[in-house]
Image (spheres, rainbow, N blue to C red):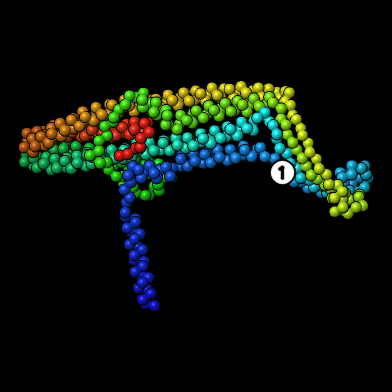
Amino acid sequence: MKRLQILLMLFLVHVGFSQTNDLTTKKTWTLQDCINYAVENNISIKDATLNKSQADVNYLEAKSSRLPNLTGSASQSFTNGNSIDPITSDYVSDQIHSTNVSLNSSVTLFQGNQINNQISQNALLISQSHFLEEEAKNNIILSVLENYLQILHAKEGITIAENNLKSTEQEVKRAKARLDAGTIALSDYTEAQSQASTNKYALINAKNTYQQYVIALKQLLELNPTQDIEIEPLDNDTEYSSILLDKHVIYNKALGILPEVNASNIAIEASEKDLDIAKGGYLPTLSLTSSLGTGYTSIDSNTFSDQFNVNFNQRIVLSLSIPIFNRNKTKAAVKTAKINIEKAEIAKQSTEKEIYLKVETAYQNALSAQEQLVAAESSMEAAKQSYELAQKKYELGGLSTTDLVISQNTYTSAQQDYLQAKYLNILYHQLLEFYQGNAITL
């Protein structure tokens, strides 16, 4: 018994240690991890997938409309006084107990070809739902990419803010020593303190911005709000300079691969099928119905089973319905279908315009970001050297606190400009790759 207790305690300790490791271990997410997880779990994509499933159901329903239906019915009635016997059709004045049982079926043989056109339209809508699902995935992938880069940008912004705060804290100490030595005025010392407070405030803002982007990414991934995530940093050796083709070439490639274009084309075809369905209302409908039935009546002296055998009947009816005037409903449906075709064509043009705008914007921004990156890097290096020189002059007493603060702010601004140009360059490079059908990789 004692040995069992010891084994149980060891097991609990092991489980507790494992759980502690699981809780304290923070997964590092790559961009591909984020994309894969978002595609599997994002609710927008799940909603698009459900729409695709609904399109499959609608197609099956349309195909099944070609089949005959089958219904069974049974009734029990009691009549008192003068009436018609429902079985024999005789006029009687007695109490009647009667039973009716029937089996009925009907099938539409021709309905202006509306059934075939509905099936064809629903098949088109299945294909469209596939493209709409892909469009939803692409939108989430691009959102994840943008948010991922924003997190990396914000994280580097925190590093800059932390370094600035450390530098100003050291400068406050130097300023205090110089104030005590009587080499600077009190205003110089308070200005150093003010800059330290400003940099501390900037660090708080930088951390808050980072957390906001992390929250947005967790929303895209549908993660629990309490779950911590860590983003894998970029490989600084990777070059993200775009090999820019002519923007019209990229645009034409995008038209050939983006699912929203195919979805727009199918929307036009589906609207044309709507027109065919509406025109079918001008044509006659041919249907076939059949039934099997029997019954029992209490005024007949035969037994229940004998009456069921004697009264057994079969019926087949072929009916033709010719539309003559339906208060212009068919005419209105045809006109509405034609309008919807034009609207679908306009929607396609709008989609193509949006794609061109996206490609044009990404192309111009990519060109601009590359040039800005080169200029920002040069400016940052110059500002860094200037700030380092200003620090040395300040230590030797050859520079005022105000000039040092100005030099530091200039360097900070140059660093932020460089970061912005760096991540915009990466973003627009990836967008252009995406519009050409290439994978997004960092």
Q: Give the image location of residue 113, x and y in percent.
A: 65, 30
Q: Which image quarter is the N terminus in?
A: bottom left
Quarter holding residue 140: top left
Q: In front: 191, or 22?
A: 22
Horizontal placement of 277 versus 248: left or right?
A: right
Quarter holding residue 415: top left
Question: Would you place residue 379 above or below residue 303 in this image?
Answer: above
Horizontal placement of 178 versus 296: left or right?
A: left
Question: Would you place residue 149 above or below residue 361 in this image?
Answer: below
Label 1: how many Cα within 10 Å (few below 14, some 14–19, many 20+): few
Which residue is at a point 55% across and 29% down the rendered structure image? 270
Q: Give the image location of residue 265, x and y in percent.
A: 50, 28
Quarter holding residue 161: top left
Q: Amino acid at mark 1?
A: Leu
Q: In front: 272, or 402?
A: 272
| Viewer can see residue 51 | yes
Q: Which residue in the rendered view is the most extreme toward the bottom? A: 1
Disc 1, SS = strand
Q: Give the residue pinned by disc 1.
A: 70
Q: Give the image location of residue 371, x and y in percent.
A: 24, 27
Which residue is at a point 9% across and 42% down the rendered structure image? 177
Horizontal placement of 168 versus 334: left or right?
A: left
Q: In front: 431, or 153?
A: 431
Which residue is at a point 57% across and 26% down the rendered structure image? 272
| Viewer can see residue 196 | no
Q: How many marks?
A: 1
Q: Give the image location of residue 229, x and y in percent.
A: 33, 47
Which residue is at a point 40% across and 29% down the rendered structure image? 254
Q: Which image quarter is the C terminus in?
A: top left
Question: Would you place residue 367 above or below residue 34 in this image?
Answer: above
